[in-house]
Amino acid sequence: MEFSELIKTATVENVLLSCAGLPAVRGTLCITSHHLLLSSCPGGDVELWLLIRNVDAVEKRLTGSSGTITLRCKDLKVLQLEIPGMEECLNIASSIEALSSVDSVMMMYPFFYRPPSLKLEEGWHQFPLEQYFQQISSQTSQWRLSTVNQDFSTCPTYPPAVIVPAAVGDEALRKAARFRQGGRFPVLSYFHPKNRTVMLRSSQPLTGPNRRRCREDETLLGTILDEGERGFIIDTRSAQAAKQARMTGGGTEPKSSYPQWRRLHRPLERGRPLQESFAKLVEACSDPSLSMDRWLGRLESSRWLSHVKAALSTACLAAQCMDREEATVLVHGAEGTDTTLLVTALAQVILDPSCRTLVGFQGLLEREWIQAGHPFHLRCAHSAYSHARLKQEAPLFLLFLDCVWQLSRQFPFSLEFGERLLLSLFDNAYASAYGTFLCNNEKERSLCKVKESTHSLWAWLNRPEEQQKLLNPLYSHNALVIWPSVEPQSIQLWQGLFLRWIRPSQHLDEAWAEIQRLVEENNTPAKESTGNRLSQSLSDHTAGMENRR
Amino acid sequence: MEHIRMPKVENVRLLDRLSSRKAVLGTLYLTATHVIFVENGSETRKETWVLHSQISSIEKQATTATGCPLLIRCKNFQVIQLVIPQERDCHDIYISLIRLARPVKYEELYCFSFNPKLDKEEREQGWKLVDLNEEYNRMGVPNNYWQICDVNRDYGVCDSYPTEVYVPKSATAHIIVGSSKFRSRRRFPALSYYCKDNNASICRSSQPLSGFSARCLEDEQMLQAIRKANPGSDFIYVVDTRPKLNAMANRAAGKGYENEDNYSNIKFQFIGIENIHVMRNSLQKMLEVCELKSPSMSDFLWGLENSGWLKHIKAIMDAGIFIAKAVAEEGVSVLVHCSDGWDRTAQVCSVASLLLDPYYRTMKGFMVLIEKDWVSFGHKFNHRYGNLDGDPKEISPVIDQFIECVWQLMEQFPCAFEFNERFLIHIQHHIYSCQFGNFLCNSQKERRELKIQERTYSLWAHLWKNRADYLNPLYRSDHSQNQGTLHPQIAPCNFLYKFWSGMYNRFEKGLHPRQSVTDYLMAVKEETQQLEEELEVLGERLANLQKSQLGDNKVKSKQQDRSKQLRLSTSNNSLANTPQEYSNDLKSFPSRSPSQGDEEDSALILTQDNLKSSDPDLSANSDQESGVEDLSCRSPSGGGCLPSEDSGKDSDEAVFLAG
């Protein structure tokens, strides 16, 4: 396929671009393979530089000889283009539609993006699992790094290396994998250094209607617990749903076969209901006709905040089991690639201060979302506006980012990064110049040579000048567990994301700048430079006098 | 004291709303002014004090095996649940409190016994802190258009107005008196705010007694005079802040609103704000939502919507925005009224003033604003806030709504206000507390008769003395947000109005952000300032040294002290490190042994280890923060098997915030 086949009209003159909160501009519109550009005059400023992959929905309206195209973007921005000429308008619209729905990963922009300031390999191997394993192995010898999945044959959605109980051999892992949906056998997700408890994750066991058992799986989970110790299985489905899953070959761990484990069901929404919730919320936020009452009603009926509350509560429960009950926890839902990762990742942010630093958080995303096989390509194919028939889209990653935002609001000093990082992650997960969120798992990434042919988002974000923008000026290391409140009064709409393009943010930005100024002022003045200089010269003086005596 | 049947009860339990399991045992005392609960705890003996005047309702609930529950709801939104062992004691406490919470004479109120140990002169100074004469001068009156009028010097024209009000220069005594006779309770149009940049003004009054057809020449002349006082504009707005239907209904009672045909050059406008009864019920409904036990997100949002509270807040704000816009952008004067012109009118005039004039967004200016639009113009504090026993239908959270409007603005304009949220909360508290004399009675006349200023203290002086606590660290007088008129977004903006948990759930610390940005930044700011001052001192010393060639060790030691100063107590880490009840919406919380085998598995269980079913819940062991003001909650580990060592040991580490 050639991009040129998809571009029916490459340039149109005299196009009017308008966008909420900004003055409209007129200029030349230009479509390239991956971008939509609008420049106000030849060789002049570029007013718009939009990644076409960011377009979620295209709406066209024709009036007489001209037409208006409304572009609803995945980052929730809405743009309008007034295009003279009916044919041009239709051509532009269909070109954008075609280019934005190119599904082949290797045709995507990251494979073409070559910024001069970055090297291709930079950032890709910043967070190897080996490094995480070393931290664990320095404290306990109960775990080992297994390469049973080296060639992705044991589990296609796991990375080549996983951390498993030292007592379980690779052959047993292969057998256990056959008993878990998609081969996702229980692996270590998090080691809590404070009390050496662990969190594992997996997919559902394939118990099926005949109540199948698997000795290796039982041994795997059994060996983690000492005699008399208890573990908790947090199932992210309702007891009813888990039971029904048996009809289709899935199920749960029956107590008889896993006597030391106690199961807790905490249903979390995923799949289509979650996607619809997202779409409803965004629709409510962008409806200007809402009265105060109907706004709260719409906010409620989107149920988004209920999902936030449920996700936070479940993660807190997992964290509480580990930190307070000192118990081992296994988390799974059905496939183990969605709500499971939401809970395990969130629990780590709550429990572990090292996940709350800028780099630590990136490591967590890499380990618990990207390498753990959250299917980003499928889940983030469309955002809230798309009219396309939904397939596997679901904003689980956004839900996670929202929960992290709630934590940052309740603990404004405890996260090293600010809202900007979360927004940037959301944007990049849905449309990006970087390869970090491409594909659904490590196997696909390896087949597409993502790590060889695209740049890593982390390399970009970790450049000092970028980092500076992402840091929270109020941050100070907090070694404690951060237990959030999950009462409805404490959970708020993430305005910075859902109303980013709607509410005026000037005053809030000014406030943020003022906070930065205050903190910087405190860090710079007398404290080091002048203070030291003065005391220095004071002591010089004293010394001088002593000498004289 | 004669109302106290039972001064002390032991073994009373204080319950926590968020967690039924967390209750503390202590002793309850009744004094002439307070209810005091003292915890039995060995070291801290935490105390909870509640002023009688804060009590809004007392409910005695059905006796249970553990005792007799007593529920005390306070006007500052604290809810106290006690369980008293003996029914008889509970009854005595209940009867005593009923009487104590509803004083019948002003002299029973706390402000007449409150003594902050200030001498007479200090007290007088305190009352002089806010001076309305000064304020009108600051606005720019008297001038060519406005003058002070003394027709009301003995409250002879209007007993709910102050003695001194500003009126247009062309309004003669005859016109004023004539107009007053045509207005409810004789509240004639008077100046509330004057904008010296363009001569536009905000005036206030009560509704005209127009009925279906009545006219009053003097009243028409009065409005004409207001228009003439603003030569730049050829009309004035008359804003009736009631819903149109209410205003029309008033016509049948001989009241009503201005007929545009009778008044030359007015533009009449309804802005529907509901009456005090609707507002009272709305707050009641919202508080019920706040009190729900483990509500779901939907319960909460639905309840909030059904209460209509935020809709009312927005209506008040919209009216204020309309008026501010008329004055600042159109240069048109506005006359505002509702029915009597002392509730909605006060709300709307003060919101408009706050938007228009940065001065009112300073601490001092805000005190002046309340004094001007609320206290001096006869807002009926006693009736609205139930200071003395009275008609419950008169009670309504009118000023609470204004205070919330200010908070909503603070959220939208974080750098525009000199004061912080705490300032608003403390003002709200003292409007009900009756600890200071400022808000006593229903009018200036009554306050003068009671000699309030000679017998009580002023809240403003008290707040001013502690102003360091109330500063907004982000405020800078030279900041762009603080120049001129504030322009809140009009539409779409519903989402900008948020539930104020800092006020309505303020005693439930667990619900709030666990670390305070305001306090942290204040400390940072203070430290920066100290450093700069020290630098100056050091600089001076250096200069002296160079002159006198004398060493001074003190300088050095002082420098070392400094490094220890920024141990901020800003984050409340005992709370931060306390898990909430994450499972209270579910029946079975994990216990250490599988005690309630779930139905699905029970058939398969071979080894029956579910005999033991009395395991303590996890959540009973994890410490919860208490619902009352408690900053030092160390967990008394309920089940005894879960140490919470980290809340003690590690907290030092987190309390220290790198400077």
Image (cartoon, coloured by chain):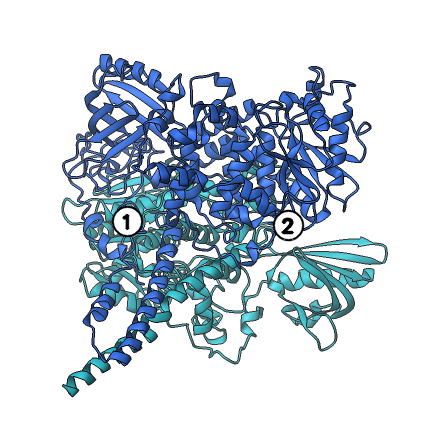
Chain colours: A cyan, B blue
Element type at marker 1? helix
Element type at marker 2? loop
Q: Nearer the viewer, residue B453 or B384?
A: B453
* Residue B390: x %, y % from top left: 46, 17
Q: Nearer the viewer, residue B434 or A258?
A: B434
Residue A387's mark? Answer: 2
The residue sitting at 71% across, 15% down in the picture is B252
Quarter of the image that includes the N terminus of chain A: bottom right
Q: Amino acid at mark 2?
A: His
Q: Nearer the viewer, residue A53 or A164?
A: A53
Image-quadrant location for residue A94: bottom right
- Total marks placed: 2
Label 2, label 1: how far apart the Cα atoms are: 47 Å
Residue B276 shows in this picture: yes
Quarter of the image that includes the C terminus of chain A: bottom left
* Residue B572: x %, y % from top left: 30, 48
Using the image, determine if residue B47 lies above or below residue A402: above
* Residue B30: x %, y % from top left: 25, 22
Q: Chain of mark 2?
A: A
Residue A248 shows in this picture: no
The residue sitting at 57% across, 75% down in the picture is A112
Q: Residues within 10 Å of mark 1 (few under 14, many from 20)?
A: many
Q: Report which residue position mark 1 lands on.
A: B573
On screen, residue B411 versus residue B56, left or right, reads right
On screen, residue A188 versus residue B611, left or right, reads right
Q: Amino acid at mark 1?
A: Asn
Tell me, yes or no, whether the two marked residues, 2 and 1, touch with CB atoms within 8 Å.
no
Residue A356's mark? Answer: none
On screen, residue B426 versus residue A176, left or right, reads right
On screen, residue A125 versus residue B153, left or right, reads left
Q: Residues within 10 Å of mark 2 (few under 14, many from 20)?
A: few
* Residue A133: x %, y % from top left: 26, 65
